[in-house]
């Protein structure tokens, strides 16, 4: 059987293996991928997902395995960003005809970046008890990190725990192919993760000026095992990934509590649940070797493992089961992937375009969210077709409510 991926040799580097048949790949993203492939620490090949697009530091939609080294900018600054989805016992018929009160209840329950009149709209003014309890799981390790990096203590760490953020982060109410209602959300490690990522990216660049003279791109500076900052980075990034997972769990709890104030029927919420990162690094075994796998906009898709691939505001999303494809380093895409910058989307599309594209979805339909309009993203169906040998679709979700960060 013909392999579904495209194999492309990179002069002076490892190959690219790209699951991009039928989807566009920008020249700038290809150049960025080739730069990563030329690093001496990269193992075997770079796997490229169908939602690939140019990113800050490294290409979004790439899986970069490295030997005894990690590239902080490939992990990025939204460390542990990912998805959570919960299936409920509700059906579409149980939802109210007017979904605006449900959206409003969710917006009240979870601080997010669009709230008016709030000095830091994405933060708690006073974190509730559930946030303080969750923070107690994170605080001891954070205190240790602050001893070595005191500026960390000044971030909005606890104020951002259980909050959504801005940009492409969202909370949705969805209905699957059988009419079951799901709650789904997308967020990461917020301001503290951004601070950790930014700080260590800069430290890696400073190290590179002394030790990595032939870097194809300064953004691809890396820490090697045994170097001054390697252990600290591994500790900090692991902590931020834990923060991100707990952040999603806290938000999901509040979303469900908010929904219960609007939907009068009693329901259970965690009939099926998935909580997965798509911006992260972890040690894994591939092709008989222990390597660090950085998934920048990619999801782990080990055989039988459940993952989430969201579409854009007006498109379908998918709950998938991994096939454990070795050549992809057991990975799949993390979404549809942008086809244009936020600025270009704002220039190209009108409010009328956005309203038409999100018809039937209870969501914001104003100029401040045009950069997230569905046409700014690749066709999710083409993306799913390009990776059909990486995952099986378990559920197909269509959103009916969308809260944007």
Image: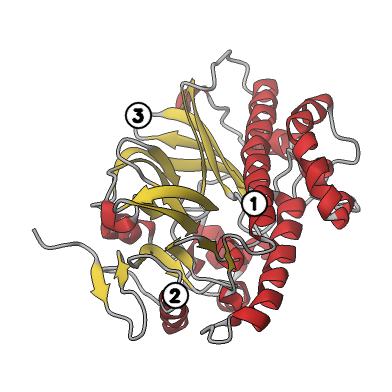
> Residue 45, position in %: x, y?
34, 67
Disc 3 to disc 2, C-alpha distance = 49 Å
Residue under circle 3? Answer: 178
Q: Which of disc 2 and disc 1 is earlier in sequence?
A: 2
- Marks 1 and 3: CB-CB under 8 Å? no
**Mark 3, mark 2: which one is toward the viewer?**
2
Nearest the eye: 318 or 73: 73
> Residue 27, position in %: x, y?
42, 84
Question: Residue 363: in sight, yes or no?
Answer: no
> Residue 249, position in %: x, y?
63, 32
Residue under circle 1? Answer: 237
Tag 1 secondary structure:
helix
Residue found 64% across the figure and 51% down from its top: 237
Residue 179 sits in which quadrant?
top left
Residue under circle 2? Answer: 40
> Residue 260, position in %: x, y?
65, 21
Q: Is residue 272 left or right of residue 367?
A: left
Q: Which of disc 3 and disc 1 is earlier in sequence?
A: 3
Disc 1 to disc 3, C-alpha distance = 39 Å
Residue found 23% across the figure and 52% down from its top: 389
**Mark 1, mark 3: which one is toward the viewer?**
1
**45 versus 175 height, above or below:** below
Which residue is at the far front?
226
Tag 3 secondary structure:
loop
User: What is the crowding at mark 3: few (fewer than 14 residues within 10 Å), some, or many (at least 20)?
Assistant: few
User: What is the crowding at mark 1: few (fewer than 14 residues within 10 Å), some, or many (at least 20)?
Assistant: many
Residue found 47% across the figure and 79% down from its top: 32
Tag 2 secondary structure:
loop
Residue 346 sits in which quadrant?
bottom right
**289 versus 202 height, above or below:** above
């Amino acid at each position: 059987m013909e392999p579904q991926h495209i194999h492309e040799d990179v002069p002076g580097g490892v190959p690219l293996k790209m699951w991009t048949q039928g989807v566009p790949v920008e020249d700038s993203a290809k150049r960025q991928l080739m730069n990563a492939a030329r690093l001496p620490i990269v193992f075997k090949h770079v796997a490229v997902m169908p939602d690939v697009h140019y990113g800050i530091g490294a290409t979004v939609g790439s899986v970069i395995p490295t030997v005894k080294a990690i590239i902080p900018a490939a992990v990025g600054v939204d460390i542990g960003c990912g998805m959570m989805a919960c299936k409920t016992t509700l059906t579409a018929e149980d939802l109210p005809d007017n979904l605006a009160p449900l959206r409003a209840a969710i917006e009240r329950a979870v601080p997010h970046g669009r709230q008016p009149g709030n000095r830091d709209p994405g933060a708690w003014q006073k974190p509730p008890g559930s946030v303080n309890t969750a923070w107690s799981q994170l605080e001891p390790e954070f205190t240790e990190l602050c001893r070595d990096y005191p500026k960390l203590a000044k971030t909005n760490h606890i104020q951002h725990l259980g909050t959504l953020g801005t940009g492409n982060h969202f909370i949705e109410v969805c209905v699957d192919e059988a009419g079951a209602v799901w709650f789904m959300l997308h967020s990461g490690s917020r301001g503290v993760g951004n601070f950790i990522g930014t700080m260590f990216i800069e430290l890696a660049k400073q190290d590179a000026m002394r030790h990595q003279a032939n870097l194809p791109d300064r953004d691809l500076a890396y820490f090697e095992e045994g170097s001054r900052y390697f252990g600290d980075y591994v500790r900090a990034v692991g902590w931020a990934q834990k923060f991100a997972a707990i952040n999603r769990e806290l938000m999901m709890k509040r979303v469900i509590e908010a929904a219960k104030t609007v939907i009068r029927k009693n329901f259970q919420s965690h009939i099926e649940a998935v909580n997965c990162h798509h911006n992260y690094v972890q040690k894994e075994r591939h092709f008989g070797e222990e390597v660090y796998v950085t998934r920048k906009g990619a999801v782990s898709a080990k055989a039988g493992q459940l993952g989430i691939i969201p579409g854009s505001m007006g498109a379908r999303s998918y709950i998938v089961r991994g096939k454990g494809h070795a050549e992809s380093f057991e990975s799949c895409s993390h979404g549809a992937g942008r086809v244009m910058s936020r600025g270009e989307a704002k220039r190209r599309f009108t409010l009328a375009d956005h309203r038409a594209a999100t018809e039937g979805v209870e969501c914001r339909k104003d100029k401040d969210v045009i950069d997230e309009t569905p046409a700014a993203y690749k066709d999710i169906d083409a993306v799913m077709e390009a990776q059909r040998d990486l995952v099986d679709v378990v559920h197909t979700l269509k959103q009916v409510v969308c809260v944007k960060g």
